[in-house]
């Protein structure tokens, strides 16, 4: 049994497919290696774009959230981390702990590459609480043959409340890529669940262009056998990274343990698409006796399907918070500037605010909302009510720190008759947001917020809605448009978008945005559609940042109520 301790030398891998073509430009993927930057230790950390209340370490690169769990009153978050610099490489499992998911204390990394089964990398994975209240980690190791294999790690001392040290049992690896499994496309084990006398776990995989969630079973959590068939697969989706599979209740917002099945339960399967760096999920039924998952026929089972987040959001991971009976979602949001910028500022990557997650009353989609604990950071609140916004109307939200804020707003739409006609071929919301920005006049909309805006509006990030009229319903488009977010020309500035599946019978739409210096997380219609953007303004920083509500549609809208708060800094690593 080997203790995870001394950092060994790490072999850096090169992949030909890790520079992704996205929305007309190349975007860095998580495993893109920059050899010229590997030996550059961070001597100074720039505060210019660092977030105030999002999770991030004090310096260096981070990516996927790993193994989040609640154990004996403590929240644990592990994450992929480069202890040597601000670009991807030398990856270890960093480890932080919290009692409220907001204030975090760093510990020593839990996993380093030390053994033949992980000497070339300790990659992503999940945590499971076994009977007897015993936590374990399943993770992907890169072995001496450069194969991706699945390993287990256990706490060295269960009496340590922070689980500081982890050991790797001698019976590793647990799962190896045998037969026709691609040795470089076999990774990211899920949290295990129990059913029919077996533990079960998924591992991401692909066969050609078919994405697959391979299923493994074990009676003792030591010896694992691959199922003859995957839990689920989908053609044309490519490699499935970071799969997540969990039950959701058909009644209410309470979260469920991973092993719950039966009446009143549906399941969610989420996958992260290596080819596009987006995610999608489906809601469906799990048949434990056959170990098959069948999505409901209510959304696409491909890259055009439902997403937890339609913006800069990847490698997400949920866990069941047994203390508060809720399911919590973490997601990684990468930088959108250049690798050279990251090296210069001494850090790269953050995690989104933890979100409570549950099934919508329709049973068709997931709803998300920032955890309630975040509200403890609010201060200096301001309120606006019954503000009439005609075409071209704009009102500034004053009295808060606009660069670091939480804002909730409800709009009333008195007249939907002039909503623009909706073309059924518009199946790509991001494309529609790119074509119809915040300054392009519509009938009902665009209306929303201008965040991280400079005083003269040379820079702003717009988060807004447009309402269209389809044959028998209204269609709501939500956008987070970064095209005017910075005067810098070298940063990635897309317009992200998602459709909002909401009934406009009451004529109201709500929006909440978490604004934090270089990130804007937005939640439309109570969390039915979420979009995260990373932005790098030059003018709209610190005291130079402003917040506005606006309407550029021909039809007036009313700002029924707006509440905004400055957000103080928690203890962050």
Image: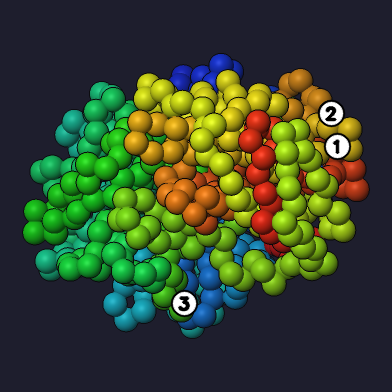
Q: Residue at point 56% right, 16% down?
A: 24
Q: What is the secondary structure assignment of the residue under circle 3?
A: loop
Which residue is tagged 2? 458
Colouring? rainbow
Distance from Cα at disc 1 to Cα at disc 2: 6 Å
Query: Residues at badges 1 and 3 in contact (C-beta under 8 Å)?
Result: no
Q: Residue at point 31% right, 45% down?
A: 282
Distance from Cα at disc 3 to Cα at disc 2: 44 Å
Vertical comparison of 281 with 99: above or below: above
Question: How far from the left and from the top, in percent, is residue 319?
Answer: 42, 63
Q: Which mark is residue 454?
A: 1
Query: Residues at badges 3 and 2 in contact (C-beta under 8 Å)?
Result: no
The quadrant of the image that shows the C terminus is: bottom right
Q: What is the secondary structure assignment of the residue under circle 2?
A: loop
Quick one: 277 or 325, which is closer to the camera? 325
- Circle nearer the N terminus (3, 2): 3
How many C-alpha atoms fall within 10 Å of the one at disc 3: few (<14), some, or many (≥20)? few
The quadrant of the image that shows the N terminus is: bottom left
Vertical comparison of 450 with 352: above or below: above
Q: Residue furthest top?
A: 24
Which residue is tagged 3? 324
Quick one: 479 or 422, which is closer to the camera? 422
Q: Is residue 524 visible?
A: yes
How many C-alpha atoms fall within 10 Å of the one at disc 2: few (<14), some, or many (≥20)? some
Which quadrant would residue 570 be assigned to in this image? bottom right
- Circle nearer the N terminus (1, 3): 3
Question: How far from the left and from the top, in percent, is residue 564?
Answer: 74, 59
Q: Residue at point 27% right, 42% down?
A: 298
């Amino acid at each position: 049994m080997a203790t995870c301790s001394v950092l060994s030398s790490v072999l850096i891998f090169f992949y030909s497919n890790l520079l992704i073509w996205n929305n007309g430009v190349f975007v860095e993927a998580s495993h893109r290696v920059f050899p010229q930057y590997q030996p550059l230790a961070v001597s100074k950390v720039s505060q210019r774009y660092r977030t105030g209340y999002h999770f991030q370490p004090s310096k260096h690169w981070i990516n996927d959230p790993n193994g989040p769990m609640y154990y004996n009153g403590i929240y644990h978050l592990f994450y992929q981390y480069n202890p040597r610099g601000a670009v991807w490489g030398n990856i270890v499992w960093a480890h932080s702990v919290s009692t409220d998911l907001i204030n975090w204390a760093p510990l020593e990394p839990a996993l380093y590459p030390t053994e033949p089964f992980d000497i070339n990398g300790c990659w992503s994975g999940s945590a499971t609480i076994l009977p007897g209240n015993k936590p374990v980690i399943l993770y992907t190791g890169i072995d001496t043959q450069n194969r991706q294999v699945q390993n287990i790690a256990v706490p060295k001392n269960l009496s340590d409340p922070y689980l500081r040290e982890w050991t790797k049992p001698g019976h590793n690896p647990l799962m190896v890529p045998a037969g026709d499994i691609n040795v470089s496309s076999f990774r990211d084990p899920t949290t295990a669940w129990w059913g029919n006398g077996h533990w079960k776990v998924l591992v991401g995989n692909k066969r050609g262009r078919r994405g697959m969630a391979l299923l493994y079973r074990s009676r003792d959590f030591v010896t694992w056998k691959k199922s003859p068939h995957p839990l689920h697969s989908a053609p044309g989706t490519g490699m499935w990274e970071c799969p997540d599979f969990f039950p959701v209740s058909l009644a209410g917002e309470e979260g469920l343990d991973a092993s719950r099945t039966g009446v009143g339960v549906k399941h969610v399967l989420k996958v992260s698409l290596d080819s596009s760096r987006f995610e999608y999920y489906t809601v469906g039924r799990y048949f434990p006796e056959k170990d098959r998952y069948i999505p409901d026929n209510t959304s696409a089972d491909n890259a055009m399907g439902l997403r937890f987040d339609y913006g800069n959001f990847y490698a997400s991971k949920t866990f069941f918070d047994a203390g508060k009976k809720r399911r919590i979602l973490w997601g990684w949001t990468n930088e959108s500037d250049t690798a050279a910028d990251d090296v210069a500022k001494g850090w790269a990557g953050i995690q989104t605010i933890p979100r409570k997650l549950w099934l919508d009353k329709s049973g068709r989609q997931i709803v998300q909302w920032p955890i309630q604990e975040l509200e403890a950071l609010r201060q200096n609140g301001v309120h606006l009510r019954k503000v009439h916004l005609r075409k071209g109307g704009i009102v500034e939200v004053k009295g808060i720190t606009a660069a670091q804020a939480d804002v909730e707003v409800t709009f009333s739409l008195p007249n939907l008759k002039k909503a623009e006609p909706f073309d059924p071929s518009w199946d790509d919301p991001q494309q529609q947001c790119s074509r119809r920005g915040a300054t392009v006049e519509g009938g009902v909309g665009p209306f929303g917020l201008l965040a991280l805006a400079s005083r003269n509006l040379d820079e702003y990030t717009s988060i807004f809605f447009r309402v269209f009229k389809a044959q028998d319903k209204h269609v709501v488009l939500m956008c987070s448009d970064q095209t005017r977010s910075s005067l810098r020309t070298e940063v990635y500035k897309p317009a992200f978008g998602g459709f909002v599946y909401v009934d406009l019978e009451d004529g109201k739409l709500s929006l909440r945005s978490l604004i934090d210096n270089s990130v804007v997380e937005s939640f439309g219609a109570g969390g039915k559609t979420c979009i995260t953007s990373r932005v790098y303004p030059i003018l709209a920083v610190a005291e130079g940042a402003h917040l506005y509500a606006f309407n550029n549609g021909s039809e007036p809208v009313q700002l029924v109520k707006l509440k905004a708060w400055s957000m103080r800094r928690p203890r962050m690593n």
